[in-house]
Amino acid sequence: MARGKGDDGPHLVDRHVGRRVEARRKSLGYSQSQLGAALGLTFQQIQKYEKGANRISASKLWEIAQFFKVEIGYFFDGLTAGETGVAESDTVSFDHDYPVTRQSQEIARLAPRLSLSQQKVALALVRELAGERKDED
């Protein structure tokens, strides 16, 4: 399966790897232009990688891993066989199918500083704002 089924868009693995590149880049504070310059690419190419529109070659993924000082496997963390279409199921869901923003990263960074009761209040607020209702964990 090259890019998914029909016109479904980028392959799920390409999207996942791209999101992991984007998340790591943002967590380290690099712009797409800075990452592109370090790899000899344009920021447009980095955008395409991060969206999964263009696949990242093995050699380029190795360069990205070296630049970010992570193992290659970092980019595949959280990916399961069922999500790649390898398993019999055609339904694919990502618990993390959302764009990474500076705000979401800051929330994630600050949350562990809160007490457990404060975390529960914050979680309830976020759920309410997102329109999701869930009973106490």
Image: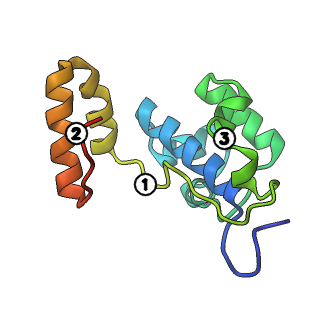
Badge 3 is on which residue?
A: 39
Give me the residue at 45% from left, 30% from top: 28
Helix, strand or loop for disc 2 = helix
Badge 2 is on which residue?
A: 123
Give the Cα distance between marks 1 and 2: 19 Å
The three-letter code of the residue at mark 1 reads Pro
Q: Is residue 67 left or right of residue 100?
A: right
Label at residue 99: 1
Q: Nearer the viewer, mark 2 or mark 3?
A: 2
Q: Nearer the viewer, mark 3 or mark 1?
A: 1
Residue in the foreground of this view, choosing between 69 and 119: 119
Helix, strand or loop for disc 1 = loop
**What is the quadrant of residue 69 in the picture?**
top right
The three-letter code of the residue at mark 2 reads Leu
Give the Cα distance between marks 2 and 3: 39 Å
Residue 62 x, y percent position in the rendering: 76, 34
